[in-house]
Amino acid sequence: MPVSNFRDFGGYASSHGGHVITDRLYRSALIHKASDDARARLAAYDFGLIVDLRYKAEQDHEPSEWPAQYETRVLLHGSDREGEAPHLAILGSKATDPGIVDVYFTKYYNALPYNKLYRPLFAEVLKRLAELDGRMLVHCTAGKDRTGMIVAIIHSILGVSFDEIMADFMLSAHVPGLAEMAESYVETASRQYGYAVPPALLQKLMRVEEDYLHAAFRAIEAQSGSMDAYLDEMGVDAAMRARLQDRLLVNS
């Protein structure tokens, strides 16, 4: 099985000139279910930084199992932190109506930029990326929500237009693998959560909607005034943003 939702998120034009470098910035879903061949191909990228945005319980349940040489390259949540992925929180509530998904995810994205766990983690990702010479891979479980948020922030720093930020975000709605992930999870989820999880609910959980990312950007505008101000508050100041642009933008 290939790694789902795996793609290069470079190549976009920048308002600072040139475009985002390719073959440096990658995103994906989890790799736990990938075949040995797919894992070998992934390891061959020799990522200098791997960002696993999943909660510790997710990591323990479906470990990534990178080769030993990657041990110091993986950025994780602190081991003392616990929590639930957005899709798991919905299943844990024993929801049956797919309509609850949009309501939940809009609230989730509205809060995500200021989440007490993710905000410092996003800041650490950006600080490490500003000093990184090699490739980076960022992933969560489906590679669409938490991953989508940090990718949107990186694109914003690099001067990618909001329309293209949204276009890249929405690519996750069409990649093969996510719908199949939902289908394969029906029996497991029903057993794990103790109720008959409707397949339509799981399919909805794997969808991506423009309103979700709009909610996150509205929250940043409302609470910080601008993306630059939000980043300043995180310790990702203008000098660091300039380093990111120098490293990740090319003119050719």
Image (cartoon, grey):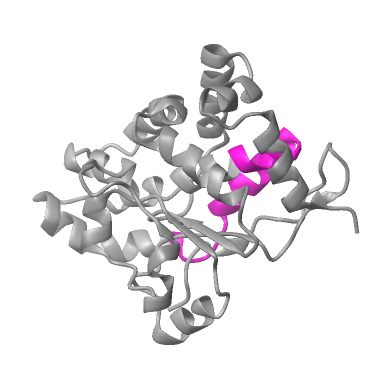
**Coordinates of residue 127 in the picture (x, y in percent):** 55, 43
Position of 172 with respect to 37 (left or right) is: right
- Who's the residue at 39% across and 25% down the image? 107
**Coordinates of residue 239 in the picture (x, y in percent):** 69, 33
In the image, which residues are magenta? 153-178
Say above or below: 239 vs 10. above
- Residue lying at the far right of the rendered structure: 252
- Who's the residue at 67% across and 42% down the image? 155
The C terminus sits in image quarter: bottom right
Say above or below: 206 vs 214. below
Q: How many marks?
A: 0
Position of 15 with respect to 94 (left or right) is: right
- Give the quarter of the image for residue 240: top right
**Coordinates of residue 97 in the picture (x, y in percent):** 28, 36
**Main secondary structure of the magenta stretch:** helix
- Who's the residue at 30% across and 44% down the image? 85
Viewer-side residue, 211 vs 186: 211
Say above or below: 47 vs 93. below
Position of 186 with respect to 245 (left or right) is: left
Q: Is residue 33 magenta?
A: no
- Who's the residue at 73% across and 36% down the image? 163
Viewer-side residue, 157 vs 174: 157
Residue 67 visible in the picture: no
Viewer-side residue, 109 vs 106: 109
